[in-house]
Amino acid sequence: MMRPIEHIGVVAVLPSDQLVELTTVASDVAAIIVVDGRGVTSGPDLLARFGVAFDVPQDEGAPSWVALADSLWRALSLIDSNRVLVVLTNADELASRSMSDLISLVLLFTDLANQVATTDRGFARSLQLSLVLLGESPSFDDP
């Protein structure tokens, strides 16, 4: 059983079978962006997948973490909701092969969530941002 959406913090880890319930429950109170992580096993793969989802401009042929952060900021400013969930499916594939890149993504979202949570940092309105990682391994079991 999925926890209520208001209990999802900046980052949540859930089993893959929660995707349908998450999108059904949360769609009434949040904008939901699902990024397919199937086959993503490295930082460049991850940046490319998020690049497509968030229209990240390519710097010298490949998206960068800085470009991703800037594109996320821009995309969030255009979303007409004060609550946004970005869901990465199959996150266990990346976790098993490149944990450091998954950690970089989590840190990027943590920093961005802190920036958009208040208007003090230049964001037009307060917004609650969460990254939800879905996977199949035991690390992704619902607590």
Image (cartoon, rainbow, N blue to C red):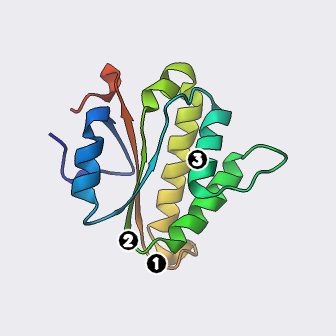
Q: Nearer the viewer, mark 3 or mark 1?
A: 3
Whether residue 34 is visible here, answered yes or no, is yes
Q: Earlier along the polypeptide chain: callout 2 or callout 3?
A: 3
Q: Position of residue 107 (x, y in %)?
A: 53, 44
Q: Amino acid at mark 3?
A: Phe
Callout 2 secondary element: loop
Q: Position of residue 111 (x, y in %)?
A: 53, 54
Whether residue 5 is visible here, answered yes or no, is no
In the image: residue 71, left or right of residue 19: right
Residue at the spot of label 2: 82
- Give me the residue at 85% from left, 47% from top: 60
Quarter of the picture containing the C terminus is top left
Query: How much space separates mark 1 and mark 2, taking CA atoms?
Result: 8 Å
Answer yes or no: do the residues labelled 2 and 3 have beta carbons within 8 Å?
A: no
Q: Amino acid at mark 2?
A: Asn
- Give me the residue at 35% from left, 21% from top: 137
Residue at the spot of label 1: 125
Query: How much space separates mark 3 and mark 1, taking CA atoms?
Result: 23 Å
Q: Position of residue 12 (x, y in %)?
A: 34, 42
Query: How much space separates mark 2 and mark 3, taking CA atoms?
Result: 21 Å
Residue at the spot of label 3: 50
As drawn, the residue found furthest toward the right would be 60
As drawn, the residue found furthest toward the bottom would be 124
Quarter of the picture containing the N terminus is top left
Callout 1 secondary element: loop
